[in-house]
Image: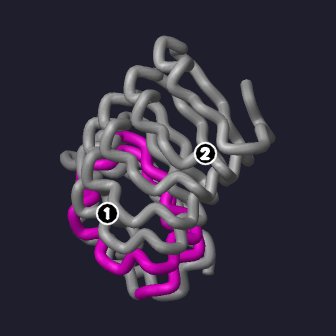
Amino acid sequence: NLSGCSGGANVSALSKVRELTLTNCRRIEDVSALGGVRKLHLGNCSGVVDLSALGVVRELCLDGCDRVTDVSALGAVRKLNLSYGTALEDVSALGTVRNLDLTNCTAVEDVSALGKVRRLLLNRCEHDTDVSAFGAVRELCLWGCGGAAVEEGDDAGGGGGGGGRRQKSHK
């Protein structure tokens, strides 16, 4: 855990670490050496922009990394937190992520490609959000999403028998 590190820390020596937390390390920019880390938490590391080397990380937290715009390399990540990614617009490459947090990602408009995500948090979305295509989503959180279109009684589990989706929709 190197939370709060100051200066432009060189993280290349940490490439063999399995789990790493670098929260609030605002001057870290190059994380390309961390592609082998299994569980990586880069919360509020506002200097991080290029995520192309992080596609094999299993769990990735980028909450508060407000300069991230390209997440196309992250489709293989299993658990991904992009909350407060205010510059993020296109999430179409994230359709196979199992657990996805897009809380307060206010620039994201189209979430139609996320139908296979198992747990999806779209809290505080500011755009109309059509969630009718979310067939595999088991838990959908829409707190503060005034424009979310959810049909009452919608069962995304298919075929009945208790496989339904838990919906949390608070406006």
Density class for disc 2 (Cα within 10 Å; few <14, some 14-19, many ≥20) is: many
Residue 157 seen in this snapshot: no
Residue 86 x/y as whole percent: 53, 73
Please tell me whether the stretch drawn in magenta is mainly helix, strand or loop. loop
Q: Which residues are magenta?
A: 98-127
69 lies left or right of 130: right
User: Position of 140 compared to 162: left or right?
Assistant: right
Q: Which residue is labeled 1 in the image?
A: 91
- The location of residue 167, given as percent across then percent down, is 48, 60
Picture residue at 48% right of the left edge, 12% below the top = 16
Q: Nearer the viewer, residue 1 or 83?
A: 1
Q: Which mark is residue 150?
A: none
Q: Which residue is mark 2?
A: 28
- The secondary element bearing badge 2 is classed as loop
Left or right: 109 as drawn, with respect to 12? left
Quarter of the image with the N terminus is: top right
The image quadrant of residue 5 is top right
**Type of the residue with mark 2:** Ile
Label 1 residue SS = loop
